[in-house]
Amino acid sequence: MALGATYNASEIEDKWYAYWMEHNYFHSEVDEREPYTIVIPPPNVTGVLHMGHMLNNTIQDVLIRRARLQGYNACWVPGTDHASIATEAKVVAKLKEQGINKADLTREEFLKHAWEWTEEYGGVILDQLKKLGASCDWERTKFTLDPEMSQQVIKSFVDLYNKGLIYRGYRMVNWDPVAKTTLSDEEVNHVEKQGNLYFIKYKIEGSKETLTIATTRPETIFGDTAICINPNDERFTHLKGKKAIVPICNRVIPIIEDEYVDVEFGTGCLKVTPAHDENDKMLGDKHKLEVIDIFNDDASLNSFGLHYEGKDRFVVRKEVTKELDEKGALIKTEQHINKVGTSERTKAVIEPRLSDQWFLKMEELVKPAIKAVLEDDDVVLHPKKFENTYRHWMTNIRDWNISRQLWWGQQIPAFFYGDGKEDFVVAESIDEALVLAKSKTNNNSLTTESLRQDADALDTWFSSWLWPMSVFDGLNNPDNKEFNYYYPTNDLVTGPDILFFWVARMIIAGYEYTDKAPFKNVYLTGLVRDKQRRKMSKSLGNSPDALKLINDYSADGVRVGLLLSAPAGNDLMFDEGLCNQGKGFSKKIQSAFSLTQMWNVDKTIPQPESSRIGIEWYKSKLQKALVEMDDHYSKYRISDALMTTYKLIQDEFCGWLLEIIKPAYQAPIDSKTYNEVMALFEDNLRIVHPFMPFLTEELWHNIEDRSPQEALCINTWPKVEPIDENLLKNFEFAAEVISGVRTIRKEKNIAFKDAIVLSVINGEKVDSVFDAIISKLVNISELNYISEALDSALTFRVKSNEYFIPMEGAIDVEAEIEKLKEELKYTEGFLRSVQGKLKNEKFVNGAPEQVVASERKKEADALAKIETLKTSLVSLS
């Protein structure tokens, strides 16, 4: 069957994925086998397949398919993350298009819209992963807001609160004015931006004297409650104990002293806005300053902004600057570069804000996770260079702000029964909360209607940090058989950008709840970038359509293309040409199969010696490749494992073995050779299957009819057997001999159909085991071992062996003599030209040293070639 002309990748992919699903090959149940478990990094429910997903999930699929072939009980758990901020933003935007304002809805009404949105769009990315060939256990698909998943999140919150690890505090937090929620420190990116430094004049109360302050945020003057000077700064000694007047709002504020002030920055004195800067807040607490919050939750100014009320902070910045200038309070403006906190999700500029929030104490929690990675190797990061990043984050950790001012997510299980800040209880349900509230207040008249649940939702990461445990119901039912069997999982594949957000937190949670690491190995992929090294993104328009790539190059081609340039931890410079190379590899395998199907098999003819040796050689070559692949896989060098596979099949199987065993034109092949080669072809399909599952399954069933129990997807990985190193070494030598003869045939125009005699002085004492293959591949009628050199012969060397091809009958001697004379004449003329330059002292002394050296090399090469040509002419005469 000539597959090359009929292979329709799209049809083949749909056919085999449906077949795999029909026979439930991807589903895992607890049994006596050793488990191999991977949990998917759950993509956002809002997501669609992009290049990062393609790379990440291809690697996971390679690992899980190989484990399945190795006989492990392979379980790859898929799922999606509810992504509080991103999903709520999408739903709010959709409602806005319909003329509905979120603020006009109750929580229940909004959540109804959110669930409708999720049911309509939430499964898109998982369906797209199926197009890639992902062999997930789809029966185990989880969503972080599934009832049993949410129950475990709530259970975790209550448990940590009862242990004294979760607390409620009035703290300075990162406020996202677009999403209108707090963010943890790790969700804020600090970006260098060009801004201005504004020098503003403040009057000193009761005098004509003024004081100049430098600030990057003139709009915050409405929140000023003090000016701070350094007590050691002699320039401002006379201002101690005095008061200043804030421009525009004319508020009188104290001048305080603190060594915190950097005398070198700006003018050496600082305006203090405790509500809008973390360091200012510490100064405010220390000096008992008034706290004035001037912003609404969308970062527009509130009533403290006077006539700027309702205007956006950046609009106010421009207008305040103009008013200050008009009032003579703006001294000057200078350009200034500073790092601005921006929301990782919405890209909005973060506003520091004081707020009552829930925090998780991290100082003690992180200790087992630090030890596991940095001391005990209970969790191994691949590549290990990321240990430094891990160490930095974990040893500088701060308490985690886990509350979000959102409705989409698990609602915080805190129930308030009064107006005081401490008038609350924490419980898994309102009924349990009522019991606790009655006990705490000694008030049996309380009812569930008396309780008000905290409106905030938990940070999405507080849900996903339980993922390896919660997917097996490990917190609800820690002794269940699935949790005990599948957990801890084996490998985690993810991007380094969420090493702290997710990976570190999962390790922390794993030790807190099970005293075990949640996985043994973490394979950190690089980021997918374009050829200009830019990170792929929708905004740059440099990210190709993932599904179009699959359509153009096949899923197998794209998988191979991605992995050809994806070394662990290094960024992938994506080039569509790599997918084309993957598609080309697919066609090479198809062509190899088609070639074998064109042969007529004859059971009556014996196996040629060349075929016997060729098959023995390839068996050892395959075994050597298996050992290399095992080493690469063990070190998570997936692209290297692919390259070993690629070279074995492209170069050794297609390039050598098929040529060695191929019968003469229209002649049959012996059945022994055919059966052995097809068995090796099946081994090839086994090792390629993790990378190219669709093509390999198709060819597997084309070799012969197979039952569902014999599908390649659930077959076996080839066993590693002894390697004949001597055979491999001898073949390398034979390959050089074959190359030498082919070179002479090409140079001397000796057609392959014309058999030649080859004689050799065997100085290397090479085994004659490959003589039959040499004779077949370069059409040698006789291969003789001789002790002395032959006259009138074409010759070449391989190490100390010298090979001779008698010219009589092989070439037209007279024509060869004329050809050599022409070449000699040209080379002598070229030598005269070069030597003319070198005799020119002006050239030798004036030209750059490397130019002169190049000419001397040309002279030496020409002299050597003339000597060779003259020797050849003598031998022909």
Image (cartoon, rainbow, N blue to C red):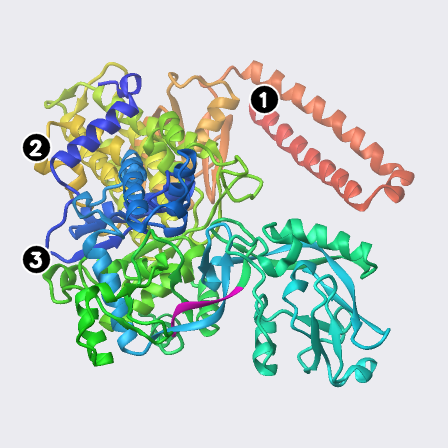
Q: Is there any visible trace of residue 269 in the rendered image?
A: yes
Q: Quadrant of the N terminus?
A: top left
Circles 2 and 3: CB atoms closer than 8 Å: no
Q: Is residue 190 left or right of residue 73?
A: right
Q: Main secondary structure of the magenta part?
A: strand
Sequence-earlier tag: 2 or 1: 2
Q: Is there any visible trace of residue 397 in the rendered image?
A: no
Q: Is residue 536 above or below residue 426?
A: above
Sequence-earlier tag: 2 or 3: 3
Sequence-earlier tag: 1 or 3: 3
Q: Residue 32: which disc?
A: 3
The residue closer to the viewer here, 448 or 476, is 448
Q: Is residue 64 left or right of residue 603?
A: right
Question: Which stretch is magenta?
Answer: 353-361
Q: Is residue 24 above or below residue 756?
A: below
Q: Nearer the viewer, mark 2 or mark 1?
A: 2
Q: Residue 707: which disc?
A: 2
How many numbered marks, from 0 up?
Answer: 3
Q: Secondary structure at mark 1?
A: loop
Q: Counting other residues with Cα less than 10 Å from the Cα at mark 3, is it few (<14), some (14-19), or many (20 or more)?
A: few
Where residue 261 appears, x then y in whole percent? Answer: 69, 77
Where residue 833 appears, x then y in whole percent? Answer: 80, 29
- The residue tagged 1 is 877
Residue at x 76% of width, y 40% of height: 856
Q: Residue 503: which disc?
A: none
Residue at x 58% of width, y 65% of height: 276
The residue closer to the viewer here, 10 or 788, is 10
